[in-house]
Image (cartoon, grey):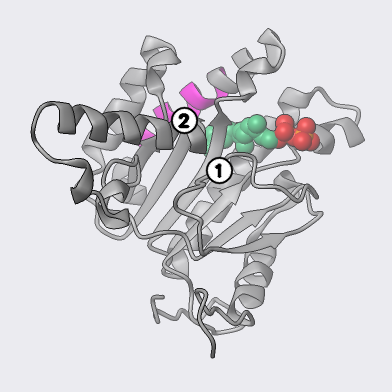
Amino acid sequence: MSLFKKKNYAADRPVPTHIAIVMDGNGRWAKKRGLPRTAGHKVGAEAFRTIANYAKSIGLKYLSVYTFSTENWKRSEEEVNAIMELLERYLRELIRDMDKNRVRFCFFGDLSRLSPQLQEEARIAAEESKKYAGVQVNFCLNYGGRAEIVRAAKQFARDCADGKCSPDDLTEERFSDFMYSAGVPDPELVIRPGGELRTSNFLLWQSAYAEYYFTDVLWPDFGPKELEKAIAAYNGRNRRFGGVK
Ligand code: FPP
């Protein structure tokens, strides 16, 4: 855990190094207001912008967000298209404002199913932001935790078949290097707004010892105060990693 402290973190407590968020509740937020679900995603994208800026200001090093899951393709074509368009616009702005924000971007997931335009924007965003050292945002896009583990297993099996390594060489650390998150420390805290109490296939391997924080607040309403509450709850937890304290 980073002991980096900033004045604007009201509770003045240590901030985790890596926080992961399931941005849930956009659809219900919109429905409550008589708006189309897509309006909820639009406000959800703004909520993300605010949280990313705030996370940076309190010294967080890694922020991972579930932007689109491998299961989200089951939604209506209209909703999927609206989310993809929103993402394209978001990435274009992110590339445009990169020098101002100085955030490193990474993409976890199978991007090959996305539009060529979106793939290209993701590539540019990742490539051109490599130079920034402060905070890294991981967009989990067409991401599924099980699919990621299967992909890692296939890569390792291929390396074995090519004679580069043998099954007995495999350790948890080594297997982590086959994940999209290679080199990124595991999240200490996973936040799920929106009232559902499940992991939904999010960072399954990486969250083995994460603390979970659930809240009924819907993602578009999740602001800096909510993030502070989550961090304060995390700081009150007794992390034993299977041991005894
Ligand atoms: C979950 O809410 C949200 C999604 C499946 C999409 C997440 C997308 C965004 C937040 C917008 C794009 C983000 C960025 C960073 C550009 P839901 O639709 O499942 O809500 P519900 O459970 O109320 O139906």
Question: Mark 2, mark 1: which one is toward the viewer?
Answer: 2
- Residue 202 tag number: 1
Quick one: SS at disc 1? loop
Identity of the residue drawn at 58% across and 39% down: 201
Q: Is residue 151 placed above or below 79 in the rendered structure?
A: below
Assess disc 1: are there few (<14), some (14-19) or many (≥20) residues with their C-alpha within 10 Å of its C-alpha: many
Identity of the residue drawn at 63% across and 24% down: 72
| Figure quarter occupied by ligand 1 | top right
The tag earlier along the polypeptide, 2 or 1, is 2
Disc 1 residue: CB within 8 Å of ligand 1: no
Identity of the residue drawn at 50% across and 53% down: 52
Q: Is residue 93 visible to the viewer in this orientation of the structure?
A: no
Tell me which segment is drawn in magenta: 85-96
Quick one: SS at disc 2? helix
Q: Which residue, given by chain and number where applicable, does mark 2 sit on?
A: 147
Name the residue type under label 1.
Phe
118 or 157: which is nearer to us?
Answer: 157
Q: What distance separates the C-alpha of mark 2 from that of mark 1?
A: 10 Å
x, y percentage for residue 65? 52, 45
Name the residue type under label 2.
Ala
Identity of the residue drawn at 68% across and 67% down: 225
Q: Is residue 170 left or right of residue 232?
A: left
**Residue 91's quadrant in the figure?**
top left
Q: Is residue 41 placed above or below 102 in the rendered structure?
A: above
